[in-house]
Image (spheres, rainbow, N blue to C red):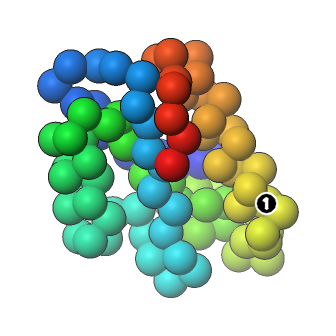
Amino acid sequence: MLSLAVNYPAKINDLLAILCPGFLDSKDYAHLKNLAEDLSAMGYTVVRLDPTGTWESEGDISEYTVTQYLADINSVWQYMSNKIHIRMFC
């Protein structure tokens, strides 16, 4: 299971940004939180995630691979597609 944080804009629309932290970063680091808040203020729904095997997400660090990371992003995309009608993927 992935650990996510979602920032919703004041008015829900079809804009989505997925913030993908680097190897040593967590979704909860200040720079990612600040960016999420700024994008949300601009009208984006913003999802921050901890990829599989890191921080609060399940799995072992050995599962932190490019293939798994792309699968994680796809999972977030699919999940959010069911929540809002998405026009833009960042």
Residue 44 x %, y % = 32, 37
In the image, is residue 23 above or below residue 28? below
Residue 54 in the image: state x and y as whole percent. 59, 69
**How many circles with numbers are drawn on the protein?**
1
Q: Is the residue 15 above or below the residue 74 in the image?
A: above
At horizontal 40% and vertical 31% (from top left) the residue drawn is 15
Q: Is residue 65 above or below residue 34?
A: below
Which residue occupies 44% across, 45% down?
17
- Along the viewing direction, whichever of 65 and 86 lies nearer the viewer: 86
Regarding residue 6, the answer to whether it shows in the image is no
Q: Is residue 75 left or right of residue 17?
A: right
Is residue 79 toward the left or the right of residue 90 in the image?
Answer: right
Badge 1 amino acid: Gln
Residue visible at 20% across and 61% down?
Answer: 34
Mark 1 residue element:
helix
For the question of whether residue 51 can be seen, the reply is yes
**Which residue does the numbered mark 1 point to in the structure image?**
68
Judge from the rendering whether residue 44 lies leftward or rightward of residue 71; answer left or right.
left
Q: Residues within 10 Å of mark 1 (few under 14, many from 20)?
A: some
Q: Image quadrant for the N terminus?
A: top right
Q: Position of residue 64 (x, y in %)?
A: 73, 71
